[in-house]
Amino acid sequence: MSLTKKSVEQLVGFENEEPAEKEVVLRRYTRFCNIREILENRQIELRNTDSWDDKNDKYLLDLYRRHRAWKSIFAICGTRTKKEHYHHWKTYAEDGACIVFDRKKLIQGAKEANFKYGTVRYKMLKDLNNDPLPGIKLLPFFKRAAFSDEREFRIVTGLTDESGGTAILPIKLSWIRKIRLNPWLDMDESKCRIRDLKQISGCQKIDMKRSTLLQSRRWEQFGDSIYQAHSDHTL
């Protein structure tokens, strides 16, 4: 079999079988139970930031909480990447899934709920004294440059009382572009989970598949083509 440059390029272009998103999206990598709650309740529960691992991030968020005279502050985060990335799966959803939202519609929902939202900006320590001080409205949207691969977008709000309540963002299922299950699931388990999610009212037509990031037939065909092209030659 002859392997031309064009055929190689075509095969490499399908290494993930997932084309880059043409629209503005937000990917939320999370646990299966959270995906189910979003679909069943048509809402996203923002998380209290007290338990966050990054103390630098928590510190700025707490300063913003004090500025707004909130008793508590809540946030939900996602990534703006147009394609899935291995480190997002491994860090946030190794045993979960990724729900992909239309970001423009999600922003409109945040506006209607009077929540704050924005793209996270990444800064290096050496630049802190040189750059002009930003407005306080941007305080929840800074992280250190080491996190820049996350390409994070977040939605933030707070509570003015000490009720210990939660912050809820109502959504519509039409805002969901697709759902991808983690690539470590075997095929039978992924089919079972997809069947379960599609039984939720209104979810039958949502695009749901297992991610092929770690096992793509197109990628295997690429290797097969190279192997077969040289199978008649000795090393």
Image: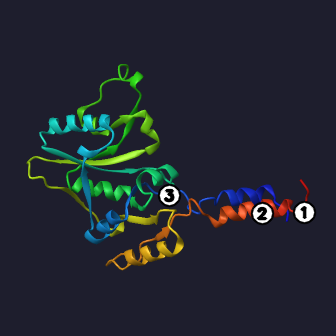
The residue that label 3 is drawn on is 21
- Name the image colouring: rainbow
Between tags 3 and 2, which lies in front?
2
The residue that label 1 is drawn on is 232
User: Residue 121 in the image: x percent, y percent?
Assistant: 38, 37
| Secondary structure state at the residue bearing disc 3 | loop
Q: Is residue 138 above or below residue 118?
A: above
Give the camera-side residue of 173 and 123.
123
Residue at x 41% of width, y 22% of height: 126
| Secondary structure state at the residue bearing disc 1 | loop
Left of 139 or right of it: where is 223? right
User: Residue 29 in the image: x percent, y percent?
Assistant: 40, 56
Residue at x 43% of width, y 54% of height: 24
Give the camera-side residue of 23 and 30.
30
User: Residue 83 in the image: x percent, y percent?
Assistant: 51, 54
Kind of residue indicated by mark 2? Ser
| Secondary structure state at the residue bearing disc 2 | helix
Left of 16 or right of it: where is 171? left
> Mark 3 to mark 2: distance in Å?
28 Å
Residue at x 25% of width, y 38% of height: 61
The image quarter containing residue 128 is: top left
* Residue 204 visible at all: no
The residue that label 2 is drawn on is 225
Between tags 1 and 2, which lies in front?
1
